[in-house]
Each structure stands twice: as structure tokens, then as C-alpha cells.
Image (spheres, helix red, strand yellow):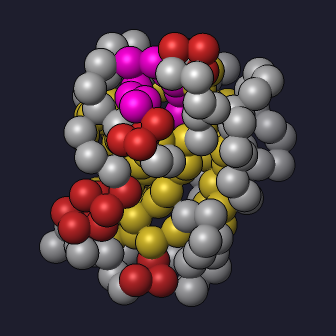
């Protein structure tokens, strides 16, 4: 049975191979434009900076150079139940310099489409065993991000040779470029 986390809570993952599932529902009638949310992953070292540009994994760079993190593709609508985007992780392959994997979701062209996370509901991040499809943990974002256009859903970090997940749920008024500036 999955552990349901609250904001700020941390939990050991305990599996070297897993999938990160991200989901959300949008209210496109509020802006007249369809929403396109994008999941991105920043693989960082001790200095909280991306190891190299190739360790920024998203729909245009779907696989990290070490093969440890793979984005399965861009969902342009977010329609339907369940995961809208997934990222496959194999920690047995991860670069030895990596100590953190930051999971971010941004709204594509949020400013021009006048969209923000206040119009997004039922957002979640879950980590599940890829082989059995059984959830290990889940974090449902309950905050109302009324002006934010990007949200750090969670982070996976290494502590005492164990990989843990922290439920972050921190919004940012800005887009993907702002996260690139922060972590580069």
C-alpha cells in the first residue's frame, strides 16, 4: 500500500528502479486555450546545480546521458485519468556525482495563454514499482497556486547512501527558464 505524503514529508524509496507518475486536471474553459503542462527533471550534484546540460531531462532531451532517467514523452492535453506524464528512473545507472533529482512541472506558454496553476486541480506525483505497478508513495498537491506557472512537485535526494523522496509543492511565478537559471 502506498504511503500518502503531506507537504514537507520525506520517505525512503527503497527500490533502485521505479517510475515517477505525474498527473493533473485543468480547467481550459477559464482561459479559452488548452493547457499543456510539462514535466522536467534536473539531475544535480552537491552544489544544487545540474551536472551538465544533458542532465536536464524533458520532452526535447528525453534521456540522461547515464541512462538512469528517461522521460516517456510529452502529453499535450492532460486528458483522462491517471498519469499524464511519466519518468522512468534506474538509480543503479545514475552518475556517481548525482545527489538530487528535482521534479518540476511547468505550464507551456503560460504567460501568453494567461494560465496558472490556480486553474489546475488534482495534481499529484507518485512513485511506483515499474515491475509490479504498485505505488510506493504518493503526494497530492492541495495548495492553490493562483499566480504560479511552475511548481516543484518533489525531489529525490541521496542521504547516507539511501535515496529518499521529499514532497515539496513549491510554486514559482515564472517558467522553465527560471528553473534553468536557478539550477545552472
Residue at position x 83%, y 40% in the image? 132
77 lies above or below 100: above
| Viewer-nearest residue: 116 or 172 | 116
Observer-nearest residue: 161 or 30? 30
Q: Please tell me in which quadrant of the rendered image residue 43 appears.
A: bottom left
Left-right relation of 91 to 85? left
Extreme residue in the left direction: 47
Residue extending farthest to the right is 132
Provide residue 153's location: percent of width, then percent of height. Answer: 40, 37
* Residue at the spot 64% in from the left edge and 54% down from the top edge: 87
Q: Is residue 20 left or right of residue 107?
A: right
Q: Nearer the viewer, residue 98 or 15?
A: 98
Residue sitting at x 52%, y 68%: 57
User: Does residue 32 belong to the magenta stretch?
Assistant: no
Q: Which residues are magenta?
A: 114-127
Q: Is residue 37 above or below residue 87?
A: above
Q: Position of residue 64 (x, y in %)?
A: 56, 78
The reply to whether residue 116 is visible in this rendering is: yes
Quarter assignment of residue 63: bottom right
Amino acid at each position: 500500500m502506498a504511503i500518502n505524503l503531506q507537504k514537507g514529508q520525506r520517505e525512503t524509496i527503497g527500490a533502485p528502479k521505479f517510475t515517477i507518475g505525474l498527473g493533473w486536471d485543468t480547467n481550459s474553459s477559464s482561459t479559452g486555450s488548452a493547457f499543456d503542462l510539462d514535466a522536467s527533471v534536473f539531475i544535480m550534484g552537491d552544489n544544487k546545480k545540474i551536472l551538465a546540460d544533458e542532465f536536464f531531462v524533458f520532452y526535447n532531451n528525453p534521456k540522461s546521458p547515464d541512462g538512469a532517467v528517461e522521460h516517456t514523452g510529452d502529453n499535450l492535453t492532460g486528458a483522462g485519468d491517471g498519469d499524464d506524464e511519466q519518468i522512468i528512473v534506474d538509480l543503479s545507472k545514475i552518475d556517481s556525482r548525482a545527489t538530487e533529482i528535482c521534479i518540476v512541472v511547468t505550464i507551456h506558454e503560460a504567460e501568453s495563454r494567461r494560465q496558472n496553476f490556480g486553474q489546475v486541480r488534482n495534481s499529484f506525483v507518485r512513485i511506483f514499482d515499474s515491475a509490479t505497478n504498485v505505488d510506493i508513495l504518493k503526494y497530492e498537491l492541495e495548495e492553490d497556486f493562483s499566480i504560479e506557472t511552475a511548481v516543484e512537485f518533489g525531489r529525490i535526494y541521496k542521504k547516507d547512501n539511501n535515496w529518499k523522496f521529499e514532497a515539496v509543492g513549491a510554486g514559482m511565478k515564472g517558467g522553465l527558464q527560471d528553473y534553468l537559471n536557478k539550477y545552472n
